[in-house]
């Protein structure tokens, strides 16, 4: 189906109408399931339950079938939630969450009125506030490929926020798996170091070397190695310099840090700028700097 001929306005109006239709259809489906359930028509078709009928006859996924059956049964005792489902105030997910939190009908009614318009996460929080119960979670591990596992875990808000923070700070679009891998690698190294007093050969740089600032340990070792400007041998105004610039991914490691005198340091910086901008006049710049410098 091609919609490229539609105007923006039509496209946006249409989708609203379609979502409305989808919700109306969902409510109709729930009413049908409710009636099929009451008449136990699924057993006429040799299905052991409404769930099996929904999955194997209607083609729903197991979770989608479960949500619809739960909602259809709630609708039987609380017909008033029908219009809330239709208007989008209550989602099938939220209804399932409430039902799994409490079997008490009055409590369900009360909580359902409080979770209107909430997202799945907000709904979980609200249920916890009201009942003090954390929703039962299926802790499962499942192999999904030769080297990948699917793991369902419950995280506190604090841990979840930390993961998001690492993703934002890295600026590298890391996946949750990559964040956990990084955090756990650091944790293993730290534990091994304190518990077994060992320093493992590293495959990835420790966090200190990923910072622009050079650690005092690295400075000491570089100083002992170079002792003078590694370019001209001068002993004056020595600075620690990244061979491969930090901005280009150079780390603050002993191998990538060298001693340079101020003049050489400036010269290397200028070369880097020249590479970035061929019109930049290094000699003029250095002469200007020379004139400004007080005589030795
Ligand atoms: Zn120098």
Image (cartoon, rainbow, N blue to C red):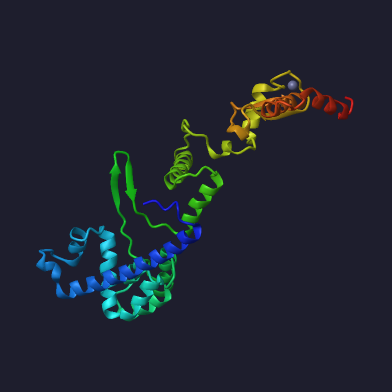
Q: Is residue 37 above or below residue 184?
A: below
Q: Residue furthest top?
A: 232
Left or right position of 273 against 62:
right
Left or right position of 92 against 33:
right
Q: Residue at x 58, y 33 (%)?
A: 249
User: Picture quarter containing residue 51?
Assistant: bottom left
* Ligand 1 quarter of the rendering: top right
Q: Is residue 100 visible?
A: no
Left or right position of 282 against 31:
right
- Choose between 174 and 69: the one closer to the eye: 69
Q: How many marks?
A: 0
Q: Is residue 246 above or below residue 227?
A: below
Q: Is residue 86 above or below residue 280?
A: below
x and y, in percent, of residue 244 in the image: 61, 28
x and y, in percent, of residue 296 in the image: 88, 24
Q: Is residue 112 above or below residue 12?
A: below
Left or right position of 91 against 77:
right
Q: Residue furthest right?
A: 295
Q: Residue at x 87, y 30 (%)?
A: 292
- Choose between 259 and 221: the one closer to the eye: 259
Q: Residue at x 34, y 70 (%)?
A: 24
x and y, in percent, of residue 274 in the image: 70, 26
- Choose between 22 and 284: the one closer to the eye: 22
- Choose between 189 and 273: the one closer to the eye: 273
x and y, in percent, of residue 255 in the image: 59, 26
User: Picture quarter containing residue 118?
Assistant: bottom left
Q: Is residue 123 visible?
A: yes
């Amino acid at each position: 189906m091609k919609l490229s001929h539609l105007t923006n306005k039509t496209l946006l109006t249409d989708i609203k109408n379609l979502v409305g239709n989808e919700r109306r259809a969902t409510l109709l489906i729930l009413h049908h399931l409710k009636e099929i359930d009451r008449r136990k028509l699924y057993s006429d078709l040799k299905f052991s339950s409404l769930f099996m009928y929904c999955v194997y006859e209607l083609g729903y996924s197991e979770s989608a079938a479960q949500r619809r059956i739960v909602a259809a049964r709630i609708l039987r005792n609380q017909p008033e939630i029908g219009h809330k489902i239709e208007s989008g105030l209550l989602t099938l997910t939220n209804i399932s969450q409430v039902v799994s939190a409490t079997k008490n009908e009055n409590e369900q009614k009360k909580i359902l009125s409080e979770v209107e318009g909430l997202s799945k996460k907000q709904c979980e929080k609200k249920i916890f506030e009201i009942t003090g119960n954390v929703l039962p979670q299926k802790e499962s591990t499942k192999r999904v490929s030769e080297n990948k596992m699917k793991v369902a875990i419950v995280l506190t808000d604090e841990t979840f926020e930390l993961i998001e923070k690492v993703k934002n700070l890295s600026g590298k679009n890391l996946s949750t798996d990559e964040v956990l891998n990084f955090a756990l690698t650091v944790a293993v190294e730290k534990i091994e170091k304190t518990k077994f007093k060992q320093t493992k050969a590293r495959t990835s740089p420790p966090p200190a070397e990923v910072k622009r600032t050079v650690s005092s340990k690295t400075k000491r070792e570089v100083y002992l190695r170079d002792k003078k400007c590694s370019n001209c041998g001068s002993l004056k105004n020595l600075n620690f310099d990244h061979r491969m610039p930090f901005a280009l991914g150079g780390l603050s490691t002993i191998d990538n840090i060298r001693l340079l005198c101020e003049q050489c340091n400036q010269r290397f910086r200028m070369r880097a700028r020249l590479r970035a901008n061929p019109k930049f006049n290094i000699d003029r710049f250095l002469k200007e700097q020379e004139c400004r410098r007080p005589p030795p």
